[in-house]
Amino acid sequence: MSRYIDEQAIDDIALGASVLGSGGGGDPYLGALIAKQAMNYWGPVHLWNINDIDDDALFIPCSSMGAPTVAIEKIISPSQVIRAFEMMETMLARCATGTFPIEVGGINSLIPMILAAQKQIPVVDCDGVGRAFPEVQMVSFYLDDLPSGSNTDAPRDI
């Protein structure tokens, strides 16, 4: 069963990211503001359950990297998020079905909402680790030998 994310859900995600992220991943208030603005401008975000995804669907996670305090001085731009996502689609020579947060970190829990609103693609109700993490390879995908951003190997069929 799928549903749409509304402003209350954004506030709930921001609160959950504060608790589960234990302060990691930046200030979720800033991410919530940007996500709400994106939804007001581009439209609602469709949330999918992980069990509703076809086996051959491509979902690309999105996030920011680096010190989250920088986002206070230089606010994340939706154009940055979409440009990186589309570059990944180009590299994979395939359009993504949707996206999901790579971690439950303050801003990173909400960046997928910005992208999903802008591209009108769904967000999956999942993440890559269940908490905030300090390094990009610290995701559960690593346990299944799936490449991460720290792996420079070319993409491979899985």
Image: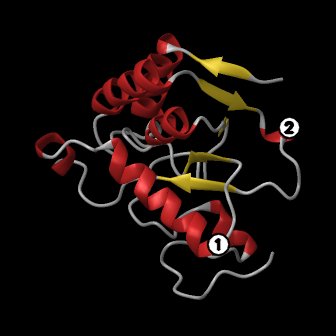
Q: Which residue is drawn at 45% across and 49% down?
A: 132
Q: Are marks 2 and 1 in contact (CB under 8 Å)?
A: no
Q: In this view, does 154 lie above or below 120?
A: below
Quarter residue 46 falls in: top right
**For residue 32, which numbered disc appears in the image?**
none
Q: Residue at 28%, 31% (x, y): give it.
A: 30
Residue 102: percent from left, percent from top: 54, 52
Q: In this rendering, is residue 146 above or below 44? A: below
The residue lying at 30 percent from left, 26 percent from top is: 29
Which residue in the structure is indicated by mark 1? 92
Give the image location of residue 59, x and y in percent.
68, 53
Estimate the x, y position of residue 12 in percent, counting from the top left: 49, 18
Judging from the image, what secondary structure is the residue with disc 1 in? helix
Disc 1 marks a residue whose amino acid type is: Leu
Q: Mark 2 points at which residue?
A: 52
How many numbered badges does the structure rendering display?
2
Residue farthest toward the bottom in the current orientation of the protein: 153
Q: Which of 102 and 74 is in front in this view?
A: 74
Q: In which quarter of the image is the N terminus?
A: top right
Whether residue 118 is situated above or below residue 134 in the rendered picture: above
Where's the C terminus, which quadrant? bottom right
Q: Nearer the viewer, residue 58 or 105?
A: 58
Residue 45 located left or right of residue 18: right
Reply above or below: 95 against 126: below
Query: Which of the pair 21/39 is nearer the observer?
Result: 39
Q: In this figure, which colouring scheme has been used for the structure? A: secondary structure
- For label 2, the SS is helix
Q: Residue flagged by tag 2: what amino acid is it?
A: Asp
